[in-house]
Structures are given as C-alpha cells and as structure tokens.
Amino acid sequence: MKKTPLYEQHVNLKGKVVDFGGWALPIEYQGQGILVEHEAVRTAAGLFDVSHMGEVTVKGPDAEKFIQKMIVNDISPMSNFQIYYSPMCYPEGGVVDDLLVYKYHQEEYLLVINASNTDKDFQWLQEHLEGDVEINNISDQCAELALQGPKAEVILQKLTDANLAELDYYHFLPEVNISGVTALISRTGYTGEDGFEIYLDPKDASFLWDKLLAAGKEEGLIPCGLGARDTLRFEVCLPLYGQELDRDITPLEAGLGYFVKLDKNDFIGKDALMKQKEMGIPRKLVGFEMIDRGIARSHYEVQADGEKIGFVTTGSFSPSLKKNIGLALIDAKYADEGGEIEILVRNKALKGKIIKKPFVKKSVKGAK
C-alpha cells in the first residue's frame, strides 16, 4: 500500500489503518470510533488526511477551452481563485470521475480528482489533449489536510494572518502562511460542514497536522478517519465515485443535472446526455429510510412488487438521525417520495420508504 506523509502520525495516534484504494489510511482512531468522529465534525471540528487525492495542473493559452471540452459544467463564468465542481463524462454519458476545478487565471487551473481514479483520469486527459496546453500530474508533490466543522475557521485562524472570514465558499487563497508553512487554502470539504482543505508540500504535512491538532484541542478538534468522512458526506448526499457515480451512471441519473450545462459548446458526452434528457431520464437516485430493521448496503438489490427496480448505492446507519438510511438508483417510475420499496438484505426483502434528500440539511457559509 502507498503511504501518505502522515502515516506515522496515524500509527502513533492508534489509527485503524486499512487499504483504501491502495492507500494505507485510517478508517477510525482507537478510543474514538466513527460515531464520535462524526459527531465531532458536526458539532466542533475534525481533521482528515486526504493526501491520497489526485492533483493535475492545466496551463497554457488554451487551458480553459480544453477543460470546457472535458467536463460537463461551464467554467466560463468563473472568477480567479474560484472553484467549480463538475463530473467528467465518457461519450456515452457515463462518468469518468467527478472533480474540482481551481482557477488561478484563464491560463492556469488545478484539477483535484479522486485518488483511485488519478492514473485513469490523467490518461483520459492526455488522450484528449489539444491546443496550446500542458497538463502535469503533480499528485506526488501535494499533501492535503481537511479541517472540517463549525469551529474550523476559529481553529485555523489561530495559525495564520490571512483573514479567513473573507474567504467565501468554493474560493481559495493560493499562498498562505500557516505557522511558517506556505499552503493553498480552499473553503471546501466533503462533509456538509464549513471548513477548509489545505494543500501543501508533503515535507510540511506532519508539522502542520500536529500544529492544527494542538491549536484546536480546546475547541474539540480530533483526528478523523475515512469512516466518518463517508457517513458525513452520505448524510448530505454528496456522491462517491464507484457508488453514486461510475461509467454506467450518468450525472443526470445521479441527480447532478444542475452541473450539466447542455447549452455550452460541445463537450465529451453532450450528445448522449441531451438525448437522455429529451427521452426522459430512465433511472433516478433516491433517498430512503428503512421501515423494517436492517441496514441496506451498497449494491443490494431494490425491488417493487417483487421485481428488481434498481440497487442501493450507499446505505448506513445515520449517526445524526439515529436511523438506517440509504441512497438507491431505481427506475424513475418508482421514484416518488413516500413510495415503498423493498431491499434484499441477506435474501430477505425488507421494507423501506423513499424520503427527501439530503437527509441532513446544512448551511455552509457563503454557499448558494
């Protein structure tokens, strides 16, 4: 397994390290567990090691044009130091990956992509490269920390002179001094809470990790593993590649139509997505809660009237709601809120009810 620059910190803090897409990362920390870590992020703050994420720079006079071709969102309205989210699609409409686009200026961008897809994504970008543009996979040159929760700003502000109150949601500061370390700070995250993602040189990661934990101790900051990261993102219905999105699921089916700008110039997957929208989206991602006792797990079959109508993409106990909930991709005609479905759990059909998404609604500073 690959190790992040913070591997020793995880071991010293008694992290339960597992194989996460080829990376040795903590799923939780002993003496805490997922429920405690989840609650800390919802009420105070949590610190995550997300150094496994991939980073690709896109530079040159044709940088914007190239990115426009590769993604379904329209980045033409972006201001400098703003961030956009977008799926990136195959010609058939399925998803290569979902990513964040960081704009420095019209000829320089940073793409942040999912760890397990880094090599695949970079190859896809290379295969479609055209115009006066240069792309580089700089993932090995970046460590990334995610400081998430309502106390995140108070904690990080202790270590920097940058005015974090002026940093809007989905914007970034490119070169910030944090306790003597130069880093990029973005007001982004994968938890539904306010917070920051910090990109820095791998050699500085351990120092800053320790600094942040010390600065946040009295605010209730604790280190958190990927288990809590998953329950947090799931409660606010943020998609996970390989579950809510993949080669066989389009962004329209996944409920991400807002990010699919069919009125912009040609992009990869546009024809297929236009056709799907015109003909009617055949499947829909719905939220559900279990009526019968049981937890619906990823890829469990979903039925209605004894017939298969889809599958669970993510299912779990919700630490915030204290009940078993899930997301499922099902035939659109069964997707009405309040409708009953059945989930096959160990070959037993258990009842569930379709409910509104997101399960937990959070208000993040500056979010529209």
Image: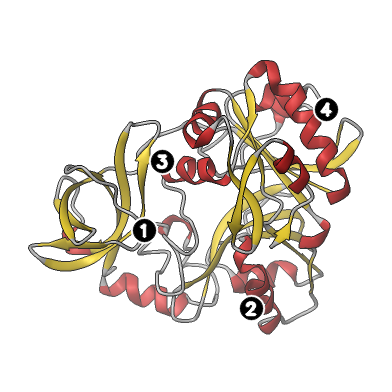
Q: Residue at x 68, y 15 (%)?
A: 218
Contact between marks 1 and 4 (CB within 8 A): the answer is no
Q: How many numbered marks have been drawn onto this rendered protein structure?
A: 4
Which of these two is toward me, 126 or 159? 159
How far apart, in angstroms, are the residues tagged by discs 3 and 2?
A: 31 Å
- Residue at which label 1 appears: 298
Circle 1 Cα neighbour tier, 10 Å, few/some/many (<14 / 14–19 / ≥20): some
Q: Earlier in the sequence, mark 1 or mark 3?
A: 3
Image quadrant where one finds the N terminus: bottom right
Residue 258 visible in the shown view: yes
Q: Residue at x 67, y 76 (%)?
A: 125
Contact between marks 3 and 2 (CB within 8 A): the answer is no
Q: What is the three-letter code of the residue carrying label 4? A: Thr
Q: Secondary structure at mark 3?
A: helix
Contact between marks 1 and 3 (CB within 8 A): the answer is no
Q: Can you name the residue that lies furthest to the top here?
A: 218
Q: Residue at x 66, y 59 (%)?
A: 23
Q: Mark 1 against mark 3, which lies toward the viewer? A: 1
- Residue at which label 3 appears: 235
- Above or below, 244 against 167 in this view is below
Image x and y of residue 40, in percent: 54, 27
- Residue at which label 4 appears: 160
Q: Secondary structure at mark 1?
A: loop
Q: Residue at x 64, y 78 (%)?
A: 124
